[in-house]
Image (tube, rainbow, N blue to C red):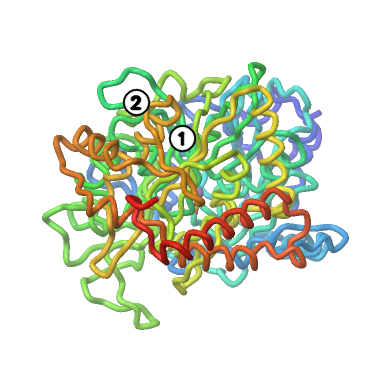
């Protein structure tokens, strides 16, 4: 079986490790990768603490990470210009011109040819690092095994923290051909150890072979294939089957002074409060980014986090706004910062970190940094990149749901949240009137563009179920799958409730809510799941009653008074704005462009529009919740 590899420069006892895995497809993939990318040698990693430690050390030695003052803390920098996802150059390899609206694709053989050209000899003089992961808990129906090939120790180190180790899983694959695999190379790097050939940065997804090729990049959203690249493959798999792959956190919430825990999954575009909703003080966090959802034998919706770590945005994390995350980041543990600033004492700083001793100079994502300096395009260089991040293990968090984090059965999910970054239309929280309306709530998420992608312009964009950036199947197919899933849950009598949230309503003076207010919206939703609160039905969803929120605000924030005025401004039905949103959604889902959008969603749009117009005639463009 290993014959093909016997004469290759495999380090240490790598061949013995491969013998344990005993998988022909793995052997063939490694052979092809070696022949094509031409590395100096090959490092095969298993799950042993020794191998994990070796990678940590090598990330430092290779200069991909630098030690900071706190024990276990390191910082990694991506190339200036590679500090977010590259949507333009991330493409799906598609056969027979299966071009689909909204999916960035390239002809299969043309794309493959281009990629092979770029990756030809790309690992010259480098070590090809091979590691194995389990996306989802081990021994679970959720599990997707993944094989990563890269020349970056930072990528390997990050994946070892963010994903469950899969060497054992690979030793017992039910189907030896069923796994994802990835080739990644950072390409040529300069003295600062950052990728240089960004013009040749490409990320090509091959759903036919369940593999991804990624070259000339380091930013995790481009390079860590287990993250957003495998997400795309899993979306394709789920939508050709009967489960869901979602851009969702999973967390459990308990009422104030209550004992029960109710699990929710929530989809939010990048930088719209997903991690902080999962980490609300008092929550039990299972995951913050990617969930697989299935229906179990009892007919209930169950979900698991396919990751075991957090790659979270660090800007704005301070003791007041995100106490749980801040305390985790500030204590000694294995932790990788990316694209933050450090001073001469090797202390880490980032925008709005709430520290008093902010430095005026240091090393940051631009290099040697001084306050007020500008980059080559005359843009002011902030202390940290807007998309600067931290990587840590969930099990290191105080509020980790230790009992369920690796539960092979997943957790039963009773509620779903959909949220965006919407300055002027949607309520802070509302409950869908049905599963179908809930699916529409997800399908019509819009968001001011954020900094997790390389696009410069800020505008309001649709972000279907917060997964639009990653969809590699047509929207219609994806939405049909959600409706079918809901039908099965309804039949079993276990349909979770769906809620829409919006933390970003503004008036001319600023946001209408504080960052911490989301705890009240979440606990209201948690109570609704158990029938604790009544709600006011409106065409766009059911909203909380003032008295319930007043009680919740007082409970959650130690007697904080929530005024009728605040409630009225936050929960007014913005009829005109919503009607405009419907117009935009009709364009987005124009049946002439988008095929196979479920009819149920058009019915929901029609219903909301008719009901809103009727209300508009009698009550105007902006209706107080006290008049609903
Ligand atoms: C996101 O942008 O949704 C992230 C970070 O979670 S990335 O790894 O870039 O996808
Ligand atoms: Mn994400």
As drawn, the residue found furthest toward the front would be 618
Q: State which tag comes first along the sequence, 1 or 2.
A: 2
Residue 249, horizontal then vertical, whole percent: 47, 39
The residue that appears at 49% across and 64% down in the rendered structure is: 82
Looking at the image, is 36 positioned above or below residue 234? below
Q: Residues within 10 Å of mark 1 (few under 14, many from 20)?
A: many
**Which mark lies nearer to you, 1 or 2?**
2
Q: Secondary structure at mark 2?
A: loop
Closer to us: 326 or 265: 265
Residue 184 % position (x, y): 62, 52
- Residue furthest right in the image: 96
User: As drawn, which residue projects farthest toward the left?
Assistant: 356
125 sits to left or right of 378: right
Residue 153 appears in the picture as rendered: no
Please state if 443 lies on the left or on the right of 38 as rendered.
left
Label 1's element? strand
- Going 77% across and 28% down the picture, which residue do you hit? 176
Looking at the image, residue 96 sits to the left or right of residue 589; the answer is: right
Q: How many marks are shown on the rendered structure?
A: 2
Give the quadrant of residue 141.
top right
Looking at the picture, how far across and down is residue 363, in whole percent?
28, 62
According to the image, label 1 marks what residue?
287
Determine the residue positioned at 22% across, 54% down. 565
* Rendering coords of residue 53 (x, y %): 43, 33
**Residue denoted by label 2:** 254
């Amino acid at each position: 079986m290993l014959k093909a590899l016997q004469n290759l420069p495999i380090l240490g006892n790598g061949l013995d490790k491969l013998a344990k895995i005993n998988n022909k497809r793995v052997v063939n993939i490694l052979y092809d990768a070696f022949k094509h990318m031409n590395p100096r040698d090959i490092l095969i990693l298993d799950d042993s603490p020794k191998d994990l430690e070796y990678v940590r050390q090598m990330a430092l030695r290779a200069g991909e990470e630098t030690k900071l003052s706190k024990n276990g803390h390191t910082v990694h920098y991506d190339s200036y210009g590679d500090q977010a996802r590259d949507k333009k150059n991330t493409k799906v390899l598609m056969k027979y011109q299966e071009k689909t609206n909204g999916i960035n694709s390239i002809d299969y053989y043309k794309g493959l040819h281009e990629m092979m050209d770029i990756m030809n000899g790309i690992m010259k003089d480098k070590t090809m690092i091979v590691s194995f992961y389990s996306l989802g808990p081990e021994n679970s129906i959720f599990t997707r095994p993944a094989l990563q090939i890269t020349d970056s120790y930072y990528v390997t180190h990050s994946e070892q923290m963010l994903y469950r180790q899969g060497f054992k899983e690979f030793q017992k694959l039910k189907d030896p051909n069923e796994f994802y695999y990835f080739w990644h190379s950072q390409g040529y790097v300069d003295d600062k150890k950052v990728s240089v050939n960004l013009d040749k940065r490409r990320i090509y997804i091959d759903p036919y072979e369940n593999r991804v090729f990624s070259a000339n990049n380091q930013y995790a959203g481009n390079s860590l294939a287990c993250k957003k690249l495998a997400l795309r493959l899993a979306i394709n798999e789920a939508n050709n089957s009967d489960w869901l792959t979602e851009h969702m956190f999973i967390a459990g919430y308990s009422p104030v002074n209550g004992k029960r825990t109710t699990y929710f999954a929530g989809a939010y575009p990048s930088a719209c409060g997903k991690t902080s909703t999962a980490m609300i003080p008092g929550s039990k966090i299972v995951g913050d980014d990617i969930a697989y959802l299935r229906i179990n034998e009892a007919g209930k919706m169950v979900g698991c986090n396919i990751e075991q770590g957090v790659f979270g945005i660090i800007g704005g994390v301070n003791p007041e706004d995100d106490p749980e995350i801040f305390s985790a980041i500030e204590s000694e543990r294995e932790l990788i910062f990316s694209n933050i600033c450090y001073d001469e004492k090797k202390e880490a700083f980032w925008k709005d970190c709430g520290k008093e001793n902010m430095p005026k100079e240091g090393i940051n994502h631009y290099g040697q940094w001084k306050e007020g300096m500008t980059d080559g395009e005359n843009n002011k260089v902030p202390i940290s990149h807007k998309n600067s991040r931290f990587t840590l293990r969930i099990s290191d968090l105080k509020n980790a749901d230790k009992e369920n984090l690796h539960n092979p059965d997943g957790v039963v999910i009773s509620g779903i949240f959909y949220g965006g970054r919407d300055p002027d239309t949607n309520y802070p929280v509302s409950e869908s009137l049905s599963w179908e309306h809930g699916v529409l709530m997800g399908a019509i998420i819009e968001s001011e563009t954020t900094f997790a992608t390389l696009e410069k312009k800020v505008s309001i964009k649709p972000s279907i179920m917060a997964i639009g950036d990653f969809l590699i199947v047509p929207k219609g197919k994806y939405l049909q799958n959600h409706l079918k899933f809901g039908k099965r849950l309804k039949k079993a009598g276990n349909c979770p409730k769906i809620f829409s949230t919006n933390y970003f309503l503004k008036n001319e003076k600023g946001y209408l809510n504080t960052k911490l207010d989301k705890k009240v919206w979440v606990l209201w939703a948690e109570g609704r799941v158990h029938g604790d609160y009544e709600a006011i039905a409106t065409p766009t969803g059911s909203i909380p009653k003032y008295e319930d929120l007043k009680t919740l605000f007082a409970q959650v924030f130690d007697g904080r008074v929530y005024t009728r005025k605040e409630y009225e401004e936050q929960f007014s039905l913005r009829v005109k704005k919503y009607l405009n949103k419907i117009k935009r959604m009709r364009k987005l889902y124009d049946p002439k462009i988008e095929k196979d959008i479920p009819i149920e969603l058009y019915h929901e749009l029609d219903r909301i529009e008719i009901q809103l117009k009727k209300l508009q005639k009698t009550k105007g463009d902006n209706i107080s919740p006290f008049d609903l």
